[in-house]
Amino acid sequence: MMLSLPQRISSRQSDTIGYKTVVIAFVPGSVASPVSQLWEDEQTSPVDELTSQTGFSYGHAFLERLSTTVNTHLDDPSFSVEQLARASNMSRTQLYRKLKAVTHTTATLFIRDIRLARAAELLAGGLVNVTQVAYSVGFGHLSYFARVFHERYGVLPSQYSKLIT
């Protein structure tokens, strides 16, 4: 049974949940496609289709707001997902779902990636040592900082500035 666009938006189908129904409903050409087929192909999500077909970045303003909040609290090692959610006026679950839909990553990894990117910038400048960088971007333990930095960039933080120059 094929539903019209207004019927799809107003109906509550058992195989979709809340915001995913709305996102799928507004993807041009998806009305005739079953919802299950849209989610089978992991390489193109409804958000990717919406962005590519309209030229509008779905969550650009949302990501900018989150990035600004994280950068404000960059040096605070206790800054958590709960605090980010509170600053964004969302529940932790809402933040997780929206961030996962837009970036395909979790809130914890989002915060960590922003911290690591800033750490890489500081290390590339070569004016501060690894310990100062780790603490200035909110990592409380140097061994954890070195491990996640190595996972992300493939090189230890102490060697990063040497490779850049």
Image: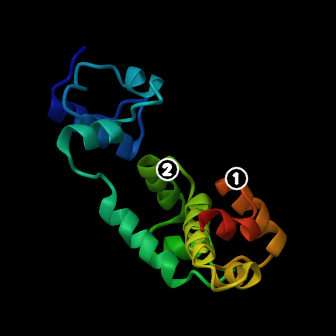
At a point 20% along the width and 23% down the height, the residue shown is 3
SS class, disc 2:
helix
Query: Which of these two is toward me, 102 or 141?
Result: 141
Q: Position of residue 95 (x, y in %)?
A: 48, 61
Name the quadrant containing residue 28: top left
Query: Which of these two is toward me, 90 or 39?
Result: 39
Instruction: Give the residue type that dot 1 points to.
Output: Gly
The crowd level at tag 1 (other Cα within 10 Å; few <14, some 14-19, many 20+) is few
Residue 135 lies left or right of residue 43; in this view the side is right
Instruction: Give the residue type that dot 2 points to.
Output: Lys
**Are the residues flagged by discs 1 and 2 in contact, CB closer than 8 Å?**
no
Q: Is residue 48 above or below residue 130?
A: above
| Residue 21 visible in the shown view | no
Q: Is residue 106 above or below residue 115?
A: above
Which quadrant, please, contains the C terminus?
A: bottom right
Cα separation, mark 1 vs mark 2, equals 25 Å
The extreme front residue here reads: 165
Residue 114 lies left or right of residue 139; in this view the side is left
Query: Which of these two is toward me, 64 or 95?
Result: 64
Query: Which of these two is toward me, 144 or 127?
Result: 127
Counting residues from the start of the chain, the first of labels 1 and 2 encountered is: 2
Residue 89 lies left or right of residue 151; in this view the side is left
Q: Which mark is residue 154?
A: 1
Q: Position of residue 143 (x, y in %)?
A: 84, 69
Name the quadrant containing residue 107: bottom right
Name the quadrant containing residue 82: bottom right
> What residue is shown with label 2?
100
Q: Position of residue 93 (x, y in %)?
A: 53, 58
At a point 66% along the width and 70% down the height, the residue shown is 161
